[in-house]
Image: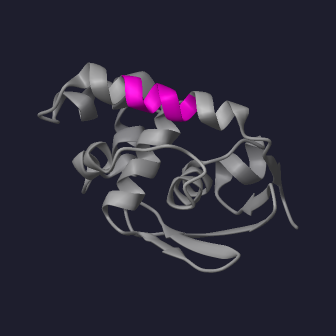
Amino acid sequence: MPPIAKIYEAYTCIADKRVQLEENRAFVTSSDGKKKYNVSWKENIYVSNDNASFWQGYPGYPVIAVLILQHKLPFKENIISLFKNINWHALNEKYKRNYDKVIDEVLNNIDYDKNEIKMETKKIYENLKNLNLEIKRKL
């Protein structure tokens, strides 16, 4: 399973409209705009060239964003919309990949009930656990 921070990163992809969804593939642009990830799928097998999916074998934020847009994970539009214009790459560098500190900074800059955001994100995380996904390097 990915760090829960990857769900928050997926929120920003969706809020910023950086996911180009097609029939069996998607293109996801990184938060700093420097990378474009390819996600493809067949049934419950997902392939992505982002580092987490390709090297770690868990769904990275591009895959999670696609799953949310495919309605395979429950979400609240109003929560996702709070995560616009966040440069996760810069924050992850700033905090040396300490995802808890990154999430704290992001949530502290959002004017919304932090507990509700965390509860909704935890729901998505639990649903992600229950999806029978396979993350592979190629289809």
Along the line of sight, which residue is nearer the eye, 38 or 113?
A: 113
The residue that appears at 31% across and 30% down in the rendered structure is 117
Q: Quadrant of residue 131?
A: top right
The reply, left or right, for residue 1 in relation to residue 104 is right
Q: Quadrant of residue 40?
A: bottom right
Q: How many marks?
A: 0
Q: Which residues are magenta?
A: 119-125
Classified by dominant secondary structure, the portion drawn in magenta counts as: helix
Q: Is residue 25 covered in magenta? A: no
**Quarter of the image that includes the N terminus:** top right
Q: Position of residue 107 (x, y in %)?
A: 25, 30
The residue that appears at 35% across and 44% down in the rendered structure is 76
For this orientation, the residue located farthest to the bottom is 22
Q: Is residue 122 covered in magenta? A: yes
The residue that appears at 43% across and 46% down in the rendered structure is 9
Q: Position of residue 128 (x, y in %)?
A: 64, 37
For this orientation, the residue located farthest to the right is 139
Q: Quadrant of residue 30?
A: bottom left
The residue that appears at 54% across and 50% down in the rendered structure is 61
Figure check: 33 above or below 100: below
The reply, left or right, for residue 123 in relation to residue 108 is right
Q: Position of residue 138 (x, y in %)?
A: 86, 65
For this orientation, the residue located farthest to the left is 111
